[in-house]
Image (cartoon, helix red, strand yellow):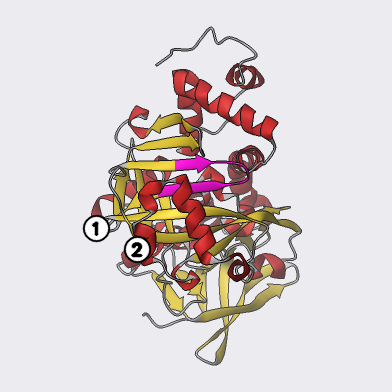
Amino acid sequence: MRAMKTKYDVLIVGAGSGGAILGLLLARQGIDVLILERGSQLPNDIRSEILQPNGQKILDDLGILNGLPEDAVYQTRQFDFFRIGKGRLCAFDYGDLPSPYNVALTAFSSSLHQHVLDATADETTLTVLYGAVFKGLMRHGKIVTGVMAEHEGQSHEIRAQLVVGADGIGSAVRMALDISSQVHQYPEGYLLGVLDRPQGFEHRSRYYIGKGEILGLLPVPNDQLYFFYLLPNMTRASLDAVGFQRIKDAMEEIDPSLIQPLKQLTHLDQTIFRPCFRVRAATWVTDGAMIIGDAAHAMNPHISQGRMQAMHDAVVCSRVVQDCLAKGDCSGSSLAAFERERRPHVEMLQRLGDEQTFFWNSRNPVVQFAVDRVLRTLDDNVRLRYQALTATAGLRRQAPFSLTDRLVAVGLLPDWWAKTG
């Protein structure tokens, strides 16, 4: 760890997906950056995620992608969707996407992020300070000029031309900036865990949907299988009342191949309960400060783009910040170029995530029928299936379906432009 100074060009609060990438990008331009990370070390838990093609390109441009260890990521090409108890509905094949990012990479979050953090150690103008707690903002009038922080029991005042809040859903920076925001917690959460991988999941994932029930199964490195199981109106504390065996029985009934692997899980402490949130901040920039990633726009995990969009924020933010620093102008009006470019895409994805949450999580039989109808249409309709896939992969800025496409998908209109297969 490098010695901490009292003044930097840019100070980033949070060394997560957006903060670490932003720090790396700025440091490579010779900008003096300090990242304050509350955790003393990276959490080493069982959470996994999908590194989508748009995220792969960002890491590739940084020279990080090809250096990922073999035990850090697993290539998954096909995602099969099923209606619980009724069979297969649709399959999405990442091989249909343009090369070279025509595969999904499933990974353990901590291993993937550690690789990114390792890359920051080589940058001479970047300091990452672990165990540093953000305590408040320093201001000159209405202009943010730095932060107050606590590290190893000592208080520090650190000045910077720009402060960036990359500190997640409950962002302390966002609150200190007094930015109005809507933080919505969805009634559904997910139980997460890791099992030994049974046969049938080699480079293929399964996604089961039912009456208010979802089970996702993703192959991950080291011959393991990651699962996420939807739990409506649950908290971690209330799971004990339901009974872990009852949850396991439900998962085994959905996919009998899990019967043997689930025996290795004997208590809830071997799993994680993850609540889901959406954040909509009224603005992302102000004089001398900005927020990125989940601090500005957390989204439902259905869309599988949370980390990717934080990384995209970092790319666009780094470009805008470099220009602002060069001009000596980090005012809100100058930083607003970042928000103008990013907000439309992010809000489209948030809406899409909410739509998927409404339809896929529904217990309404009419809604379930419509979902099945749409997925079966996508299975036969190459054009619509590709549009849906490119949205999940982060390769399109517009919503995947027009009104006409939606009517085609539910079978109310023919598709004269479609290719079947």
**Foreground residue, 364 or 106?**
364
Residue 321 seen by the camera: yes
List x then y, in percent, for residue 150: 56, 85
Give the class, few, some or many, for how many residues have Cα within 10 Å of label 2's Cα (few <14, many ≥20).
many
Q: Is disc 1 in contact with disc 2, using a CB cutoff of under 8 Å?
A: yes
Placement of 169 over or under 43, stated as above or below: above
- Give the image quarter of residue 366: top right
Q: Tell me the number on the disc at residue 134.
A: none
For image coordinates 52% across by 21% down, the residue present is: 377
Question: Which segment is the magenta one?
Answer: 207-217
Q: Is residue 155 left or right of residue 253?
A: right
For image coordinates 30% across by 32% down, the residue present is: 99
List x then y, in percent, for residue 111: 34, 63
Placement of 201 over or under 293, stated as above or below: above
Placement of 398 over or under 361, stated as above or below: above
**Foreground residue, 406 or 33?**
406
**Foreground residue, 231 or 179?**
231
Q: Tell me the number on the disc at residue 69.
A: 1
Secondary structure predominantly adopted by residues drawn in magenta? strand
Q: Is residue 266 left or right of residue 64?
A: right
Q: Is residue 112 left or right of residue 363?
A: left
**Foreground residue, 411 or 42?**
411
Question: Does the magenta segment cover residue 208?
Answer: yes
For image coordinates 75% across by 65% down, the residue present is: 178
Question: Does the magenta segment cover residue 61?
Answer: no
Q: Tell me the number on the disc at residue 111.
A: 2
Quadrant containing the C terminus in the rendered view: top left
* Type of the residue with mark 2: Ser
Of labels 1 and 2, earlier in sequence is: 1
> Which element type, helix, strand or loop, lies under badge 1?
loop
- Give the image quarter of residue 103: top left
